[in-house]
Amino acid sequence: MKVHGFASADVIARAERAFLVGLEFQNEPPLLSELARLAETAGARVAGRLAQKRAAPDPGYFLGSGKLEELKARCAAAAAELVIFDHDLSPAQARNLEQALGLKVIDRTELILDIFAQHARSREGRLQVELAQSQFRLSHLTGQGASLSRLGGGIGTRGPGETKLEYDRRALRARIARLKEEIEKVRLERQRKREKRRGSLIPVAALVGYTNAGKSTLLNALTRAGVLTQDKLFATLDPTTRRLCLPSGKVALLTDTVGLIQKLPHQLVAAFHATLEEITDADLLIHVVDSANPDYERQISAVYRVLEELKSITKPMITVFNKADKCGKKVAKKVLSKYKPAVALSALNGTGLASLLAELDGQIRQ
């Protein structure tokens, strides 16, 4: 497989026509609507969608042979330049698909990494994204891509190929080691800042939630932080901490964290560990949910899975059903009681903020 670069400016300039593909297996439907949002956030235009239901992915081409032919025909009809799969592909599957379709093929992880590369602003964010990209490239490095010499066995495959491949592997491993050293320095600096905050005995609340749920908007509404807010997935990657005055007169620190998503690439969880430690170190979590999204319960489950991985699921948590102004009566009393303590509000127009502050004040006093 040719490991594609993540040149976000190039993607935006060309506005590639992308065809989306998903597979339903193990009773898990593909997330093609979310994949479309991701593709648009990356700068692509969605040219079509295709889904197949199978007991398991095909080991060679991911799709069945008949569906693969259908995909090839539909891509040609839609003038697609790029095919995006809503699943992780093995290097062999990606290589086979590119050869069969005659198009560039990427998977969900590559797409999310591209978006992170576009949105990383701080030095820390860029380091973390580059580490995730380098780890992905290393795991997908093969000798059969167009950019590398051929490898294998027998006549026509011997020569400089192995040297080139091993050189690339060594270079990537060395770069990964240097990036980890830099990120460890960042982690230690964050740890020193957190220890200083703990010494001041000021409680810390972390905003967590699915991407585009409105965490940054809520931070701005509560603290006037002035953080960038956009109706895009992963609009902000860097954590921001601000002081928050509570109704009782007490002061708390409120930290905005990177948004989470279903099937979050493991490379990103590992690379952003220094940032995600803001969650593990918080005294209390404010879980922001996009209540206007019909799939909000699945998004809640996705956030819970990441919190379990971070060993933070047992922390005190207030569930905030944001965008309540857009969903009318969908946030019913039974839903609020299911995730108790919970508050319905609109961070954009400010309704319900007083209820959240009162609940937060009470939780901190406990």
Image (cartoon, rainbow, N blue to C red):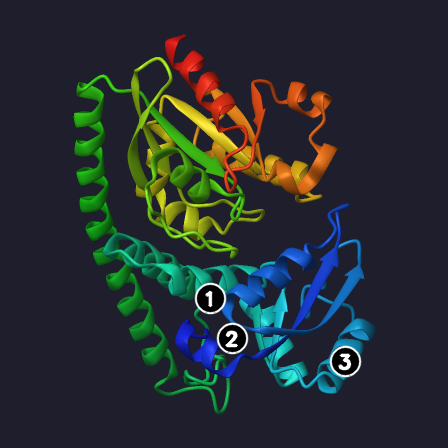
Please state the horizontal and vertical placement of residue 343, each as a whole percent of the image.
Answer: 57, 25
Marks 1 and 2: in contact by CB < 8 Å?
yes
- Residue at 72 percent across and 64 percent down: it is 58
- Residue at 55 percent across and 37 percent down: it is 346
Residue 27 at least partly seen: yes
Residue under numbered circle 1? 140
Please state the horizontal and vertical placement of residue 360, each as a whole percent of the image.
Answer: 44, 19
Foreground residue among 28 and 1: 28
Q: CA distance from mark 2 to mark 1?
A: 7 Å
Residue under numbered circle 3? 74
Foreground residue among 140 and 272: 272
- Residue at 68 percent across and 58 percent down: it is 33
Amino acid type indicated by mark 2: Met
Residue under numbered circle 2? 1
Foreground residue among 345 and 160: 345
Determine whether the residue tagged by mark 2 lies in a helix, strand or loop. loop
Q: CA distance from mark 2 to mark 3?
A: 23 Å
- Residue at 41 percent across and 85 percent down: it is 149
Sooner in the amino-acid sequence: mark 1 or mark 3 = 3
Instruction: Indicate which label's residue lies in the foreground, 2 or 3.
Output: 3
Amino acid type indicated by mark 1: His
